[in-house]
Each structure stands twice: as structure tokens, then as C-alpha cells.
Image: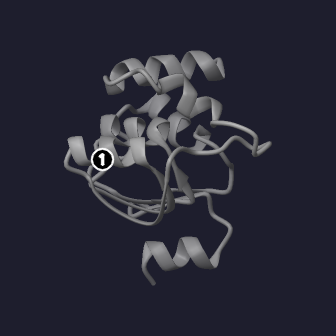
Amino acid sequence: MSLKQTLNDNNYSILTSGGYSSFESGIRPVIVPMCEDLHFFQGQSVADKIIGKASAMLLALSGAKEVYTPVLSKAGKEVFDRYGIVCEYDTLADYIVNRKGDGMCPMEMTVRDIDDPKEAFEALKKKLAL
């Protein structure tokens, strides 16, 4: 069964070819393992329910090889294109919407004007108090 099918058939928020999975929402399933090992996703295929610029920057920094997501923001796609990460998506959104549905995701907002993945990692850790 492919990562894409497994992600879509289950309630995982993230699933990788290396066997990592999580049901936790937001960017925590991406950033928390990176706090222990910056290259946690190195060379892996990653399937994630929603990817905005924040997650894309983290996955680029960590060295993910390819990504599938049902929903990808345009800024996230730009990151993947810039770093040569193959990405497959079902819907390309202008931006990731916050949980209330009334504005931009606060994580995407945090990195909106950041182009360096290491700087994004530090800004996101600070935002999440990690």
C-alpha cells in the first residue's frame, strides 16, 4: 500500500517511508522530531495531510526526498520547487487556513517573509516555545 493511500485511508496527519507516523495535527509532527535530529526526514518520502510554507521549509531543511499532500499552499510549492523536492498534491491553495477558518494559519504567517529554512526552523521553534 502506498503512503498516499495509507494516509488517505487512515487518520494519520503524517506518514513517512521510514516508518514514522503521527495523528497529531499542525506542524508539531514535523518539527518535534527535527528538534532531536535535524535530518530526521533525510531521503524519505513523506505524506502529510496539509502542507504550507512552514512544513515545506522544515521538510526541505531536513532533507525529505519527495512529498505527497492532499492540500498544499502555493508558498509551500515554491519551497519544494526551489529545493528540488518532488511533490504531489490534490489541491493547491493560496494559503493554509487557520483552524477557525477566518484567516491564515499562524505557522504559515510566521514564515511568510522568511526564505531561509534554518531561519524558519528557529522562528517556528520560538513560536511553538520548543
Q: Is residue 75 visible?
A: yes
Few, some or many residues within 10 Å of mark 1 (<14, 14–19, 20+): many
Q: Where 91 falls versus 73 (above or below)?
A: below
Q: How many discs mark residues in the rendered view?
A: 1
Locate the N terminus by quadrant. bottom left
The colour mode here is: one colour
Q: Where 99 falls versus 54 (above or below)?
A: below
Q: Is residue 130 visible?
A: no
User: Percent from the top left, x then y, of residue 97?
Assistant: 65, 44
Residue at x-position 64% and y-position 23%? 128
Relative to 57, 36 lies left or right: right
Residue at x-position 30% and y-position 47%? 80
User: Percent from the top left, x then y, of residue 106?
Assistant: 64, 30
Q: Quadrant of residue 75?
A: top left
In the rendered image, which residue does mark 1 sit on? 80
Locate the C terminus by quadrant. top right
User: Percent from the top left, x then y, of residue 9?
Assistant: 62, 79
Relative to 42, 47 lies left or right: right
Seen from this angle, which residue lies furthest bottom?
1
Q: Secondary structure at mark 1?
A: helix
| Three-letter code, disc 1 | Phe
Residue at x-position 19% and y-position 49%? 84
Residue at x-position 56% and y-position 27%? 109
Q: Quadrant of residue 32?
A: top right
